[in-house]
Image: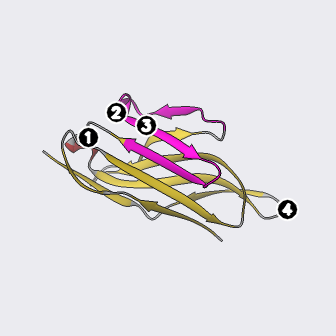
Amino acid sequence: QVQLVEFGGGLVQAGGSLRLSCAASGSIFSINAMGWYRQAPGKQRELVAAITSDGSTNYADSVKGRFTISRDNAKKTVYLQMNSLKPEDTAVYYCNAHITIGLPTLQLNEYWGQGTRVTVSS
């Protein structure tokens, strides 16, 4: 079993900062890409930021220059530093990871965290 557990959501005023973290645990052989998605009320889930196993990143245009994704491979953890938050960043944020499991027969699966709510007040 593999689990992704997120921490760090909450309520913040516009212009403030939050840091989200997501730790993977379980019978993991390796972790490939990790990322953060968000879903605002009445909207589809969208990619916020992603990072590959070698550290290459990509961001949604709406968060470029404000959010930074990083990972600690030894801790099996991905982070999202969110600065200059805006009310439109309000959403439930979900951690996502592509993880290889299952020695000796390896299998690549996609996993999701349970979501953490971020609310930005104006």
Residue topped by disc 3: 68
Tell me the mark number nearer the camera, choosing from 3 and 4.
3
Q: On screen, 9 above or below 89? A: below
For badge 3, the amino acid type reads: Thr
Mark 1 or 3, nearer chain start: 3
Estimate the x, y position of residue 113 in percent, counting from the top left: 49, 61
Left or right for 11, reference 73: left
Secondary structure at badge 1 equals: loop
Residue at the spot x=81%, y=58% of the render? 106
Residue topped by disc 2: 66
The answer to whether the residue labelled 2 contacts the one labelled 1, judged by CB atoms less than 8 Å apart, is: yes
Estimate the x, y position of residue 60 in percent, counting from the top left: 41, 34
Whole-angstrom CA distance, mark 3 to mark 4, is: 35 Å
- Residue 105 got which mark? 4
Residue topped by disc 1: 85
For badge 1, the amino acid type reads: Leu
Whole-angstrom CA distance, mark 1 to mark 3, is: 12 Å
For the record, the magenta segment spans 54-81
Mark 3 or 4, nearer chain start: 3
Q: Is residue 28 magenta?
A: no
Tell me the mark number nearer the camera, choosing from 4 and 2.
2
Label 1, residues with CA under 10 Å away: few <14, some 14-19, many ≥20:
many
For badge 4, the amino acid type reads: Thr
